[in-house]
Amino acid sequence: MGRAFRPALLAGVAAVSVLVSGCTAPRPVVTFYGNRTSAVAQADFWCTVDTAALTVSCPPEPDNSKDANLTMTAGQPLQINVPSEIGDTPWVVVFQYRDGAGKSQSGRTEIFTDSRLSFTLPSLGAGAQLSRVEVQAGLVPTQDAGGAAAITASRTWVLIVNSKVPAGS
């Protein structure tokens, strides 16, 4: 009985190890807080970086279905929380907004390299309405079309901001 049991046990262990090796850890998410509400974004762009081979393999398009959405009034700050998988690496916030005159603007923060796990994007001025915020991580050195050195994000999380007209306006 012992001999018949041993091959069955080994086959079971082999099957479990195949199943476990096929599992991958879930990708980190980013949480955005604004207007007393939170929204969670999954990575909408995730490239595989092979530093040994110096290659980057990316999907052809971002997966916009993973974007988070918040409704905010003009002039509100936005808090961004990232897990340690992002915070322990360099990351940056890139954003788009309409200024008080209605003109489209864009901006970006410094590259955070201090293991911070949160950042508050302050009000961008009277009447300024955020429209899109992107957390970029997995920063890799690349070259732009002209051959100049550039830093490119291999992972992104996106928040789409819907404008809310304050009550009584």
Image: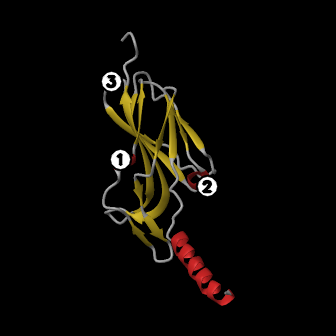
User: Horizontal and vertical percent for residue 94?
Assistant: 44, 44
Local SS, label 1: helix
Of residue 26 and residue 141, the one placed in the foreground of this image is: 26
The residue drawn where x is 51% and y is 66% is 23
User: In the image, what residue type sits under mark 2?
Assistant: Asp
- When asked about the image quadrant of residue 100, the answer is top left
| Position of the C terminus by quadrant | top left
Badge 3: how crowded within 10 Å, few (<14), some, or many (20+)? few
User: In the image, what residue type sits under mark 3?
Assistant: Ala
The residue drawn where x is 59% and y is 42% is 118
Q: Which residue is mark 1?
A: 65
User: Horizontal and vertical percent for residue 150?
Assistant: 42, 60
User: In the image, what residue type sits under mark 1?
Assistant: Ser
Say if mark 1 contacts mark 3, CB within 8 Å.
Answer: no
Q: Which residue is mark 2?
A: 88
Way the structure is coloured: secondary structure
Outermost top residue = 168
Local SS, label 3: loop
Q: Which mark is residue 106?
A: none
User: Horizontal and vertical percent for residue 28?
Assistant: 52, 53
Outermost front residue = 1
Of residue 127 and residue 70, the one placed in the foreground of this image is: 70
* Residue 80 falls left or right of residue 98: right
The residue drawn where x is 32% and y is 63% is 146
Q: Identify the mark nearer the N-term, 2 or 1.
A: 1
User: Horizontal and vertical percent for residue 75?
Assistant: 45, 24
Label count reads 3
Between the C-alphas of marks 1 and 3, the distance is 31 Å
Local SS, label 2: loop
Q: Which residue is mark 3?
A: 101
* Residue 113 falls left or right of residue 66: right
